[in-house]
Amino acid sequence: MLEWYSKGEDCGDYDFEDNIISVYKNQHNSVLEIIHTIIHEWCHYKQSTKKYYQYDSELGYLKNPLEIQADEIADKLKLKCRKDLFY
Ligand SMILES: [Zn+2]
């Protein structure tokens, strides 16, 4: 499920318990950035909740390998995704 908000403090987040991706419009300057956020949060949906929280407590948010993986996948897929949507 995807929820769209006009304002928020982060670009987006993922609620592991309720399977809800939230995207905050005010944190983005382009469609490409929004696509990046959605793919990033979607990766969290595919990842293991247990591992995520384990890494989170051991390494913290920024060093969490699942965060890094989500950014890498989003970077790889966002251009193709935008192309599929608009061209
Ligand atoms: Zn993330």
Image: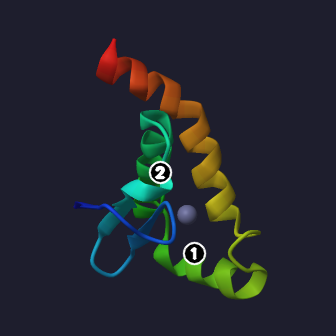
Q: Is residue 85 left or right of residue 46?
A: left
Q: Quadrant of ligand 1?
A: bottom right
Q: Say which quadrant the C terminus sits in.
A: top left
Instruction: Give x and y (percent) for residue 5.
Output: 29, 63
Q: Residues within 10 Å of mark 1 (few under 14, many from 20)?
A: some
- Observer-nearest of 38 and 68: 38
Above or below: residue 58 compared with residue 30: below
Above or below: residue 85 compared with residue 64: above
Q: Amino acid at mark 1?
A: Tyr
- Residue depicted at x 57% and y 42%: 73
Q: Which residue is mark 1?
A: 52
How far apart in space, not on screen, are marks 2 and 1 (Cα)? 18 Å
Instruction: Give x and y (percent) for residue 10.
Output: 51, 67
- Residue depicted at x 64% and y 53%: 69
Mark 2 or 1: in front is 2
Q: Is residue 72 left or right of residue 81?
A: right
Label 2 sits on a secondary structure element that is: helix
Q: Which residue is mark 2?
A: 37
Instruction: Give x and y (percent) for residue 52.
Output: 57, 75
Image disc number at residue 77: none
Q: Amino acid at mark 2?
A: Thr
Instruction: Give x and y (percent) for residue 77.
Output: 51, 32
- Residue depicted at x 58% and y 76%: 51
